[in-house]
Amino acid sequence: ETGVTQSPTHLIKTRGQQVTLRCSSQSGHNTVSWYQQALGQGPQFIFQYYREEENGRGNFPPRFSGLQFPNYSSELNVNALELDDSALYLCASSLDRGSYNEQFFGPGTRLTVL
Amino acid sequence: QQQVKQSPQSLIVQKGGISIINCAYENTAFDYFPWYQQFPGKGPALLIAIRPDVSEKKEGRFTISFNKSAKQFSLHIMDSQPGDSATYFCAATYSGAGSYQLTFGKGTKLSVIP
């Protein structure tokens, strides 16, 4: 069974650019959540996708957007990058969207904005 | 507003000792409290979790103690080993959130010295 994978591993962008991060969920999982983890902080919830529809959003501006595809893989898009967007972006998949379904995290994408 | 407060920020324990990490929450709607372990370069991994209808849960060397009236919960690691050196995050979620988003503490960096 393949776990959650994310690409790319590292990314360097400049302020104002746009970025797309990708996540492949664990086999059989229909729910994907994205989190932002700033250095020395806990992960912060960005949004969740369930069966290709957004199913909840954290306190992030609209320039953070996402997609989930029919195979349940997902993308996180960030427009107009700001320096504060530099962080580790984590994707987590779960079997379903219920609260007691374990969220399995990928290794993350380290984004640096210069 | 930080809904889950975690302490200490860092912890150094001798091999064989007990590691204790504490968390306090504000939102009384939270109904699921997981602990995650994160190694450098990896995503968080679920360690152990508890629901508020029990006061304690034990899995191997890891125990969660839960105090609903005080809105506090803690992780105890018995017989701490150097391999336990990692960052630990407490988290909370609730079924009414729809997306069951995890709200994380800021993390505790545990170092177990031989």
Image: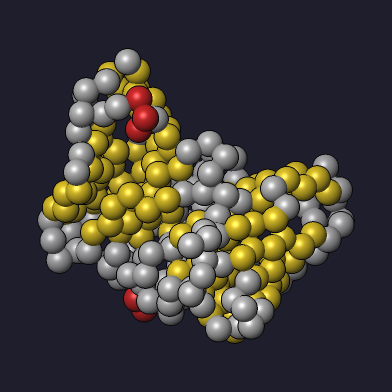
Q: Residue furthest front?
A: A1
Query: Which residue corresponds to the image point at 52% horizontal and 66% vertical from the top-left?
Result: A26
Query: Which residue corresponds to the image point at 73% horizontal and 45% vertical from the top-left?
Result: A10
Q: Answer with the quarter of the image where residue B19 lies.
A: top left
In the rendered view, tell whether residue B113 sits above or below residue B51: above
Query: Which residue corresponds to the image point at 48% horizontal and 62% vertical from the top-left?
Result: A1
Does residue A44 show up? Answer: no
Does residue B101 show up? Answer: yes
Q: Give the colour scheme of this rendering.
A: secondary structure
In the rendered view, tell whether residue A23 sits above or below residue A112: below
Query: Which residue corresponds to the image point at 59% horizontal and 76% vertical from the top-left?
Result: A72
List x then y, in percent, for residue A48: 55, 72
List x then y, in percent, for residue A54: 59, 80
Of residues B44 and A29, the one nearer the viewer is: A29
In the rendered view, tell whether residue B10 sits above or below residue A79: above
Of residues B69 and A69, the one nearer the viewer is: A69
Q: Answer with the quarter of the image where residue B62 lies.
A: top left
The tally of labels here is: 0
Which part of the image, by quadrant, shows the C terminus of chain B?
A: top left
From the viewer's perspective, is B91 left or right of A48?
A: left
List x then y, in percent, for residue B52: 19, 63
From the viewer's perspective, is A90 left or right of B62?
A: right
List x then y, in percent, for residue A71: 62, 78
From the viewer's perspective, is A34 left or right of A111?
A: left
